[in-house]
Image: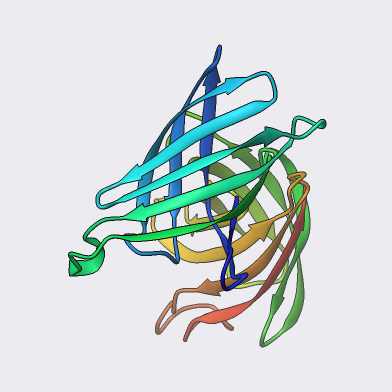
Amino acid sequence: MSLRKDKTKLTRTQSGFLLQTNNVLTGSVMVADIPCSGVGSVTGSVTGTDIAFTVGLTGLTVNLNGALGSDQASMTGDYTILASGCQGSSVNTQETGTWTANLVKPLTGNLQGNFTSNRIGVLPVTGQLTQGQNTGISYAPLTGNLSITGYCFTSANIVGLVSGTAVVMNLVNSGGVEIGQVNATSSLDGTSVTGTYHIIPQGPGGTPPCVDGESGTVTLTL
């Protein structure tokens, strides 16, 4: 979801999960880049194509009104933010603008692609990824595994999170010890993930090129 402020035309991306039960809307949204940023609960309603919901945080209320797109995968409308006593201020502030939101499909399926190491180049990767169920909180869990060819480790389990298109995948070994982390962005259709990775230094006795830590870029398709 993106909020576009009227006066500055500044666009800020937010993320989370919504659940519809009959006409009632609930969920949770991670609100960033505004006063009182944090995770807020969602309450609202859907009537036909009309949608209205409120995101509530301590000291902050975001009211959003709009309509569902004909594709049932997008929403647009107007928003109002009322911040009361945010960041130690006793002054109420108000912001208005427009918002858009797009449905992000789950990251589930077999994956393949590359880690491109800053030291040794392209490393083929295969594996599997499963996104957990939407339970109305601001993120969903990711689990899976990957195999990598010609690197300082040959396989890893994935324990991560996704919120909107923001993806974090912690790479852990069979004993549950973290090897490294991937920070990435997924496509709206859930078929690709691109970003960066870093590997924790293995220390003396480790396998090159990861003795002192390692990093690079990631491109994966599902």
Residue 49: x percent and y percent?
Answer: 70, 25
Check the image and report above or below for 131 versus 23. below
Looking at the picture, tell me which residue is in the foreground, 178 or 182.
182
Q: Say which residue appears at 62% left-offset and 72% top-offset.
A: 196
Q: Which image quadrant for residue 110?
A: top right
User: Viewer-proximal residue, 222 or 52?
Assistant: 52
**Residue 127, percent from left and from top:** 70, 48
Question: What percent of the width, then of the height, locates residue 111?
Answer: 74, 48
Q: How many marks?
A: 0
Is 121 situated left or right of 170 in this image?
right
Whole-percent x, y for residue 104 in the image: 68, 42
At x 57%, y 73%, the residue is 8
Whether residue 139 is visible = no
- Residue 112 in view (yes/no): yes
- On screen, residue 69 versus residue 80, left or right, reads right
Which image quadrant for residue 108? top right
Q: Residue reaching furthest right? A: 70
**Residue for point 65% across, 72% down:** 151
Left or right for 15, reference 203: right
Give the colouring mode of the picture: rainbow
Up-down relation of residue 202 to residue 62 (above or below): below
**In the image, residue 85 above or below residue 142:** below
